[in-house]
Each structure stands twice: as C-alpha cells, then as structure tokens.
Amino acid sequence: MQSFGVFFKPIAEQFGWSRAAISGAISVRNIVFALLAAPAGFLADRYGPRMVVLPSCLLYGVSFLLIAKVTALWQLYLTQGILMGIAAAGTWVILVATVGKWHNKRRGLALGIAAAGSGLSAVVFPPLAASLIQTVDWRFATTVLGLTALAVGIPVSLVMRDPPGLADGQSDDRIEKKGLFDAWQAMPQLLKNRAFLAIVIMFFLFNIANQLVLSHFVNYATDMGVTAVIAASMMSALGIASTAGRLVEGAFSDRRGTKAAVVACFILGVSSLILMDWNASSLMLWTSAVLFGFAFGGAIPLVPGLLGERFGTERLATTTGIAMGIMGLGGAFGSYLGGFVFDLSGSYFGALALSAALVGVSLVLALLLLSVKGEAGKG
C-alpha cells in the first residue's frame, strides 16, 4: 500500500481528478481498516491466523489487479478504498499479533523483525512501480504488484499458526459465545483505562502525520522539482530506514523500556517533519525521508508491544485490532488532509506544519501519560 503515492500523479493526469479526490480513496481504505481491524483480530483469536490472513492476501492481490481496470472515481474508491481496506484489516494486525503471542521474552525485537517485512516492501515497490509507470504505464504497474502480492502472500499465509498453548481454532468458551462484532464491545471499557487511552491517542495523532507523508511524499518531492524516479527512490530510502527503525526500536524497547522507545520515535518524527517543511532541497528531502522512515517504522512494533506488556497476550489480536482500528481513523484523516490542503493552498507546507504539531502533542502525551502505572489488565 505504501507504493500508492507513486500512482497519484499518473492517475490524476489521466482522469483530471484532484489530489483530495484521490486521497479520499486512501481515507476510505483507512476507515474500512479501522472498522474491521478488531473483528479481524477476534476471528484470528477464535479460528487461528491462517483462516483470516489467507483470504485477505488473496483479496490484496485481486484488489491491485482490479485497480488496473479503473475508469471512474467510484471504482478507485471501491478497489483502493473498500477492498484494500478489508485486506489490510485481515493481514497486518494479525501478523504482528501472532508474533506477539509466540514471544514473551524479547517481544519488542521479535515484533520489530516481523514488522521489518512491511518496511522492505517500501524499499522494493515504490521504485519498481515508478520504473514500470515510466516504461509502460500505471495500469501495467498495478498488475505486476497484484501478481507479486498473490505469489508472496499465499505461501506465507499457509504457514501461519498460533503457538501450541493457543492452538488454532481452540479458543475458550468466552470467545466462542461471542459474535464477530462483539469485539468492539470491549472498547468503551478499555478506553476508561488511562494507559490504553494514552496509547490510542498518541498513535492516532502520529498516524495522521504518518499517512499524510506516506500518501503525499512523492507528490511533494516532485512538486519541489525532483523527478518521479528520484522521488520514488526517496520513498525507498524511507522504507530502508523504516526497516531499520523497526529492528532497532524493537530491540531498544526490550532493553530500555517501551516508554523510552516511544519517546525516541516521536522526537525523530517531529524533527523530520520540521526539516521536511522547512527546507525542500534535495538533500533535506533525503534526510527528512530517512528520519521519518526510522521514526514511523520504529513506532509500528511498539503498539502490540505496549498492549501485550500491559494487557497480556491471550486476546492480543483483538486489543491490537481495536487500537489500530482507531489509529486507522487518524490515517484516514491524514491522507485526505494532505490532498485537501494542497488543493486549497497549492502546497503541502501547511499540512506538514500541522503534522509536526500533532506529533509534538503525541510526544507530550508519551512523556505525561505513559508514566501511568498499576492499570495494566484493568477493564
């Protein structure tokens, strides 16, 4: 999904759609993800991860193939928005939650290694897509991405399972007696827990900036005079830094604690956004992309890590789904915000400044609210 920013301008140029209109499809994707992440986690806790991840990987590939056939805006919203959102809810949350269940010791490092795979996709696919767009067209590029998703996702999903103590499909009676969307019934009680509320608010705000940058960075760089291929290479550098951040911050959280790791990510996030907005030279774009990639990548494994640490792992897929679902709403706003501000002002400077301020608020919350102790497991 991180490669979609490369497709923005080619699609806009062919159909004459505004950036806000195209951003809306990404926002729909994030909203669908937000609504379905918790139910997907519930299904994984009840039936095992394979039963959720396999059909989701199939849908990923099919969604990309269908994007290649888009001729109207509503079709983009259906494919990139609804179908891709369903697929995202059934893959990412389940993957990291399953890893969290397998590793009680050094969970941060394990989650960082698992999350690094997503970072590697940002290394490979944006420049690949940009090259294919330049040599053929954007429809051919989405077809290649779709076939790749099917070729990689299906074999990986077939080997996924819960650890022996939580064998696939052997959930306890409390889960068996609940319905699919009953997972959301736990949310009001969880939100009364100050620790859970702190985690959700911090990463909700952070995800606004995260999705704004991931969706619009290529547009921003090319607006500043960088070629499309170089801008895609910057996204690749962001992906490399993201992979490094997931590994380093995951291990760092095991050694120094999750609060210190979260604070470090938010400091880097604020700094990178300020640099990105302050000076749009080629060197500064490379630098800010790397810093932001490290920050956002490092933050990814900290969410299930914090939840597993404070609320246990028995229902980790469900609690992670609820938290990331709420975060997805922030991502939906961030994606649309970037396009809306650009259409309104003709630049991304205001959107980037607002993003830096929001991550700054996340940093303050991390310093103030993650000091709350003694609430783990309550609610």
Image: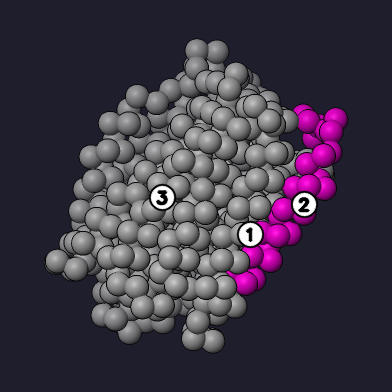
Residue pointed to by mark 2: 365
Q: Which residue was labeled with disc 3?
A: 239
Q: What is the three-letter code of the residue carrying label 2?
A: Leu
Please tell me which residue is depicted at 53% across the width and 36% down the height of the picture. Answer: 248
Which label's residue is closer to the chain start, 2 or 1? Answer: 1
User: Quadrant of the rendered structure where residue 54 is?
Assistant: top left
Is residue 134 among the parts visible in the rendering? Answer: yes
Expressed as whole percent of the image width and height from the top left, the position of residue 46 reads 53, 28
**Between 19 and 229, which is closer to the camera in this rendering?**
229
Q: Which residues are magenta?
A: 352-379
What distance separates the C-alpha of mark 3 from that of mark 2? 27 Å
Choose top left, top right, bottom left or bottom right for residue 39: top right
Residue 257: image x %, image y %?
A: 69, 31
The mark nearer the N terminus, 3 or 2, is 3
- Amino acid at circle 3: Gly
Q: Helix or strand or loop: what does disc 1 sit on?
A: helix
| For discs 3 and 2, the disc positioned in front in the rendered view | 3
Q: Main secondary structure of the magenta part?
A: helix
